[in-house]
Amino acid sequence: MNSEASVELSDRDEERAWYEYKKTSSPKLREQLIIKYASLVKYIAGRIAVTTPPNIEFDDLVSYGILGLIDAIEKYDPKMGCKFKTYATIRIKGAIYDELRLLDWVPRSVRQKAKDIEQVYSSLELRLGRPATDEEVAQSMNITVEELNQLTLEVSGASVISLDDIKYIGGDSDEVSIRDTVESHVVPGPEIKIEREEVKRLLIEAINKLPQREREVIALYYYEELTLREIGEVLGVTESRVSQLHTKAIMRLRGYLSRARATFVLT
Protein backbone atom coordinates (compact mmCIF):
# COMPACT_ATOMS: atom_id res chain seq x y z
CA MET A 1 0.00 0.00 0.00
CA ASN A 2 1.31 3.43 -0.84
CA SER A 3 1.73 6.11 1.80
CA GLU A 4 -1.30 8.05 0.54
CA ALA A 5 -3.57 5.01 0.82
CA SER A 6 -2.23 4.05 4.24
CA VAL A 7 -3.71 7.13 5.94
CA GLU A 8 -6.50 5.78 8.14
CA LEU A 9 -9.96 7.25 7.72
CA SER A 10 -11.42 9.16 10.62
CA ASP A 11 -14.98 8.45 11.68
CA ARG A 12 -15.97 11.88 10.38
CA ASP A 13 -14.60 11.14 6.92
CA GLU A 14 -15.98 7.62 6.62
CA GLU A 15 -19.48 8.56 5.48
CA ARG A 16 -18.07 10.68 2.69
CA ALA A 17 -15.62 7.92 1.78
CA TRP A 18 -18.44 5.41 1.35
CA TYR A 19 -20.31 7.80 -0.90
CA GLU A 20 -17.22 8.36 -3.05
CA TYR A 21 -16.24 4.70 -3.10
CA LYS A 22 -19.64 3.56 -4.32
CA LYS A 23 -19.38 6.13 -7.12
CA THR A 24 -15.77 5.55 -8.15
CA SER A 25 -14.62 2.14 -6.76
CA SER A 26 -11.38 3.91 -5.89
CA PRO A 27 -8.59 1.45 -4.90
CA LYS A 28 -7.22 4.12 -2.57
CA LEU A 29 -10.49 4.40 -0.66
CA ARG A 30 -10.87 0.63 -0.52
CA GLU A 31 -7.42 0.30 1.06
CA GLN A 32 -8.30 2.99 3.58
CA LEU A 33 -11.48 1.10 4.51
CA ILE A 34 -9.52 -2.15 4.85
CA ILE A 35 -6.99 -0.46 7.13
CA LYS A 36 -9.74 1.08 9.26
CA TYR A 37 -11.41 -2.28 9.89
CA ALA A 38 -8.35 -4.56 9.99
CA SER A 39 -8.45 -4.48 13.79
CA LEU A 40 -12.03 -5.77 13.67
CA VAL A 41 -10.83 -8.76 11.65
CA LYS A 42 -8.11 -9.54 14.21
CA TYR A 43 -10.57 -9.22 17.07
CA ILE A 44 -13.06 -11.62 15.46
CA ALA A 45 -10.31 -14.06 14.48
CA GLY A 46 -9.07 -14.04 18.07
CA ARG A 47 -12.50 -14.93 19.44
CA ILE A 48 -12.93 -17.75 16.94
CA ALA A 49 -9.41 -19.02 17.59
CA VAL A 50 -10.29 -20.05 21.15
CA THR A 51 -12.81 -22.59 19.79
CA THR A 52 -10.56 -24.15 17.14
CA PRO A 53 -7.87 -26.86 17.48
CA PRO A 54 -4.20 -25.86 17.94
CA ASN A 55 -3.35 -26.80 14.35
CA ILE A 56 -5.48 -23.93 13.05
CA GLU A 57 -3.17 -20.90 12.84
CA PHE A 58 -4.38 -17.51 14.00
CA ASP A 59 -2.79 -15.83 10.98
CA ASP A 60 -4.81 -18.11 8.70
CA LEU A 61 -8.01 -17.05 10.46
CA VAL A 62 -7.03 -13.40 9.95
CA SER A 63 -6.41 -14.07 6.24
CA TYR A 64 -9.85 -15.64 5.87
CA GLY A 65 -11.36 -12.71 7.74
CA ILE A 66 -9.65 -10.15 5.50
CA LEU A 67 -11.28 -11.83 2.50
CA GLY A 68 -14.62 -11.45 4.27
CA LEU A 69 -13.86 -7.79 4.98
CA ILE A 70 -13.02 -7.11 1.33
CA ASP A 71 -16.22 -8.87 0.28
CA ALA A 72 -18.18 -6.78 2.77
CA ILE A 73 -16.68 -3.55 1.41
CA GLU A 74 -17.63 -4.54 -2.13
CA LYS A 75 -21.20 -5.50 -1.24
CA TYR A 76 -22.09 -2.97 1.43
CA ASP A 77 -24.61 -0.30 0.55
CA PRO A 78 -24.94 2.60 3.02
CA LYS A 79 -28.64 2.70 2.15
CA MET A 80 -29.24 -0.86 3.34
CA GLY A 81 -30.22 0.19 6.84
CA CYS A 82 -27.37 -1.07 9.04
CA LYS A 83 -23.94 0.17 10.05
CA PHE A 84 -20.97 -1.17 8.13
CA LYS A 85 -19.37 -2.59 11.29
CA THR A 86 -22.48 -4.72 11.91
CA TYR A 87 -22.56 -5.90 8.32
CA ALA A 88 -18.81 -6.53 8.15
CA THR A 89 -18.78 -8.46 11.44
CA ILE A 90 -21.21 -11.02 10.06
CA ARG A 91 -19.40 -11.24 6.70
CA ILE A 92 -16.01 -11.66 8.40
CA LYS A 93 -17.28 -14.39 10.72
CA GLY A 94 -19.01 -16.08 7.79
CA ALA A 95 -15.84 -16.05 5.68
CA ILE A 96 -13.77 -17.58 8.50
CA TYR A 97 -16.32 -20.29 9.26
CA ASP A 98 -16.77 -21.04 5.56
CA GLU A 99 -13.02 -21.59 5.12
CA LEU A 100 -12.87 -23.77 8.23
CA ARG A 101 -15.65 -25.93 6.84
CA LEU A 102 -13.82 -26.31 3.54
CA LEU A 103 -10.82 -27.63 5.48
CA ASP A 104 -13.09 -30.42 6.78
CA TRP A 105 -10.98 -30.68 9.92
CA VAL A 106 -13.70 -32.00 12.20
CA PRO A 107 -13.53 -35.83 12.39
CA ARG A 108 -16.72 -37.63 11.43
CA SER A 109 -16.73 -39.38 14.79
CA VAL A 110 -16.84 -36.01 16.59
CA ARG A 111 -19.68 -34.81 14.38
CA GLN A 112 -21.63 -37.94 15.29
CA LYS A 113 -20.94 -37.57 18.99
CA ALA A 114 -22.16 -33.98 18.87
CA LYS A 115 -25.35 -35.03 17.10
CA ASP A 116 -25.92 -37.84 19.61
CA ILE A 117 -25.60 -35.50 22.59
CA GLU A 118 -27.81 -32.89 20.95
CA GLN A 119 -30.53 -35.47 20.25
CA VAL A 120 -30.48 -36.62 23.87
CA TYR A 121 -30.83 -33.05 25.14
CA SER A 122 -33.65 -32.39 22.68
CA SER A 123 -35.67 -35.54 23.42
CA LEU A 124 -35.20 -35.28 27.19
CA GLU A 125 -36.13 -31.63 27.41
CA LEU A 126 -39.14 -32.10 25.15
CA ARG A 127 -40.38 -34.86 27.46
CA LEU A 128 -39.46 -33.12 30.73
CA GLY A 129 -40.58 -29.63 29.74
CA ARG A 130 -37.46 -28.17 31.38
CA PRO A 131 -33.66 -28.21 30.99
CA ALA A 132 -32.27 -31.71 31.56
CA THR A 133 -29.64 -32.10 34.28
CA ASP A 134 -26.21 -33.58 33.62
CA GLU A 135 -27.26 -36.62 35.61
CA GLU A 136 -30.34 -37.16 33.44
CA VAL A 137 -28.41 -36.74 30.20
CA ALA A 138 -25.65 -39.08 31.37
CA GLN A 139 -28.16 -41.69 32.50
CA SER A 140 -29.95 -41.51 29.16
CA MET A 141 -26.64 -42.11 27.38
CA ASN A 142 -25.62 -44.89 29.80
CA ILE A 143 -22.46 -43.03 30.83
CA THR A 144 -21.27 -41.24 33.96
CA VAL A 145 -21.47 -37.48 34.47
CA GLU A 146 -17.67 -37.38 34.32
CA GLU A 147 -17.76 -39.14 30.95
CA LEU A 148 -20.43 -36.71 29.72
CA ASN A 149 -18.27 -33.74 30.73
CA GLN A 150 -15.26 -35.23 28.97
CA LEU A 151 -17.33 -35.92 25.86
CA THR A 152 -18.69 -32.38 25.87
CA LEU A 153 -15.18 -30.98 26.20
CA GLU A 154 -14.02 -33.15 23.29
CA VAL A 155 -16.84 -31.91 21.10
CA SER A 156 -16.32 -28.27 22.07
CA GLY A 157 -12.60 -28.47 21.35
CA ALA A 158 -12.98 -29.93 17.88
CA SER A 159 -16.14 -28.33 16.50
CA VAL A 160 -17.18 -24.90 15.41
CA ILE A 161 -20.34 -24.54 17.49
CA SER A 162 -21.70 -21.02 17.49
CA LEU A 163 -24.84 -18.94 17.71
CA ASP A 164 -23.62 -17.23 14.54
CA ASP A 165 -24.90 -20.15 12.45
CA ILE A 166 -28.53 -19.87 13.44
CA LYS A 167 -31.01 -20.22 10.59
CA TYR A 168 -34.75 -19.78 10.48
CA ILE A 169 -36.79 -22.08 8.26
CA GLY A 170 -39.75 -20.15 6.92
CA GLY A 171 -43.15 -21.45 5.97
CA ASP A 172 -41.99 -22.12 2.41
CA SER A 173 -39.06 -24.19 3.77
CA ASP A 174 -36.52 -21.57 2.66
CA GLU A 175 -33.63 -21.13 5.11
CA VAL A 176 -32.89 -17.57 6.17
CA SER A 177 -29.77 -17.02 8.26
CA ILE A 178 -28.85 -14.05 10.40
CA ARG A 179 -26.15 -13.33 7.84
CA ASP A 180 -28.75 -13.41 5.05
CA THR A 181 -30.91 -10.83 6.78
CA VAL A 182 -28.19 -8.18 6.56
CA GLU A 183 -26.74 -9.05 3.15
CA SER A 184 -29.51 -7.54 1.10
CA HIS A 185 -28.43 -4.60 -1.06
CA VAL A 186 -31.77 -2.90 -0.51
CA VAL A 187 -33.80 -1.85 2.49
CA PRO A 188 -35.29 -5.08 3.92
CA GLY A 189 -38.84 -5.80 2.84
CA PRO A 190 -41.70 -6.81 5.15
CA GLU A 191 -40.96 -10.55 4.75
CA ILE A 192 -37.30 -10.20 5.75
CA LYS A 193 -38.22 -7.97 8.70
CA ILE A 194 -40.75 -10.54 9.90
CA GLU A 195 -38.22 -13.38 9.55
CA ARG A 196 -35.57 -11.38 11.37
CA GLU A 197 -37.93 -10.63 14.25
CA GLU A 198 -38.97 -14.29 14.40
CA VAL A 199 -35.34 -15.36 14.71
CA LYS A 200 -34.81 -12.86 17.53
CA ARG A 201 -37.98 -13.94 19.32
CA LEU A 202 -37.11 -17.63 19.13
CA LEU A 203 -33.54 -17.03 20.23
CA ILE A 204 -34.54 -14.92 23.24
CA GLU A 205 -37.17 -17.48 24.22
CA ALA A 206 -34.65 -20.32 23.92
CA ILE A 207 -31.92 -18.50 25.89
CA ASN A 208 -34.36 -17.70 28.69
CA LYS A 209 -35.00 -21.44 29.10
CA LEU A 210 -31.32 -22.24 29.69
CA PRO A 211 -29.98 -23.09 33.16
CA GLN A 212 -28.67 -19.96 34.85
CA ARG A 213 -24.96 -20.78 34.52
CA GLU A 214 -25.24 -21.52 30.81
CA ARG A 215 -27.32 -18.40 30.26
CA GLU A 216 -24.59 -16.36 31.95
CA VAL A 217 -21.94 -17.85 29.65
CA ILE A 218 -24.01 -17.04 26.56
CA ALA A 219 -24.59 -13.47 27.75
CA LEU A 220 -20.95 -12.86 28.62
CA TYR A 221 -19.60 -14.43 25.41
CA TYR A 222 -22.01 -13.11 22.78
CA TYR A 223 -23.26 -9.87 24.30
CA GLU A 224 -20.43 -8.71 26.57
CA GLU A 225 -17.93 -10.22 24.09
CA LEU A 226 -15.62 -11.64 26.76
CA THR A 227 -13.22 -14.46 25.96
CA LEU A 228 -13.66 -17.90 27.52
CA ARG A 229 -10.75 -17.17 29.84
CA GLU A 230 -12.30 -13.85 30.94
CA ILE A 231 -15.66 -15.53 31.52
CA GLY A 232 -13.92 -18.13 33.68
CA GLU A 233 -12.45 -15.35 35.81
CA VAL A 234 -15.87 -13.70 36.19
CA LEU A 235 -17.63 -16.94 37.12
CA GLY A 236 -14.78 -18.39 39.15
CA VAL A 237 -14.37 -21.54 37.04
CA THR A 238 -11.75 -22.89 34.65
CA GLU A 239 -11.66 -22.03 30.95
CA SER A 240 -12.37 -25.68 30.09
CA ARG A 241 -15.48 -25.56 32.28
CA VAL A 242 -16.67 -22.46 30.44
CA SER A 243 -16.11 -24.29 27.17
CA GLN A 244 -18.26 -27.18 28.44
CA LEU A 245 -21.03 -24.82 29.55
CA HIS A 246 -20.94 -23.02 26.20
CA THR A 247 -21.24 -26.29 24.28
CA LYS A 248 -24.08 -27.57 26.46
CA ALA A 249 -25.92 -24.27 26.04
CA ILE A 250 -25.56 -24.37 22.26
CA MET A 251 -26.78 -27.96 22.13
CA ARG A 252 -29.83 -27.11 24.22
CA LEU A 253 -30.52 -24.11 21.98
CA ARG A 254 -30.13 -26.18 18.83
CA GLY A 255 -32.62 -28.72 20.14
CA TYR A 256 -35.13 -26.08 21.20
CA LEU A 257 -34.85 -24.07 18.01
CA SER A 258 -35.08 -27.13 15.78
CA ARG A 259 -38.40 -27.95 17.42
CA ALA A 260 -39.47 -24.36 16.81
CA ARG A 261 -38.72 -24.44 13.06
CA ALA A 262 -35.23 -22.99 13.45
CA THR A 263 -31.91 -24.76 13.18
CA PHE A 264 -28.16 -24.43 13.62
CA VAL A 265 -25.64 -25.72 11.15
CA LEU A 266 -22.98 -27.84 12.84
CA THR A 267 -19.83 -28.48 10.81
Image (cartoon, helix red, strand yellow):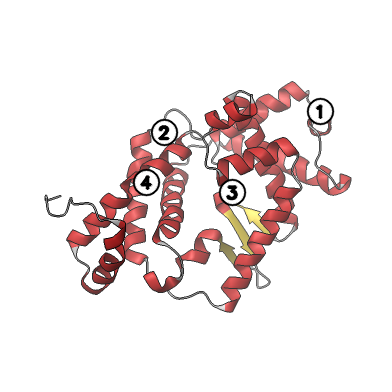
| Residue found at x 54% / y 78% | 189
| Residue found at x 82% / y 29% | 135
177 lies above or below 251:
below
26 or 63, nearer to the observer: 26
Instruction: Compare marks 2 and 4 and give the one earlier in the sequence.
Output: 4
Instruction: Please say whether residue 41 is visible from this viewpoint.
Output: yes
Q: Which residue is mark 3?
A: 163
Label 1 or label 2, whichever lies nearer to me, is 2
Pointer 3 local density, CA inside 10 Å: few below 14, some 14–19, many at least 20:
some
Q: Which residue is mark 1?
A: 142
Q: Mark 1 to mark 2: distance in Å? A: 34 Å
- In the rendered structure, find residue 56 and report the number of the disc placed on it: 2
249 lies above or below 84:
above
Q: Mark 4 to mark 1: distance in Å? A: 43 Å
Instruction: Compare marks 1 and 3 and give the one earlier in the sequence.
Output: 1
Q: Mark 3 to mark 4: distance in Å? A: 18 Å
- What SS does tag 1 mark? loop
| Residue found at x 46% / y 65% | 82
| Residue found at x 66% / y 28% | 151
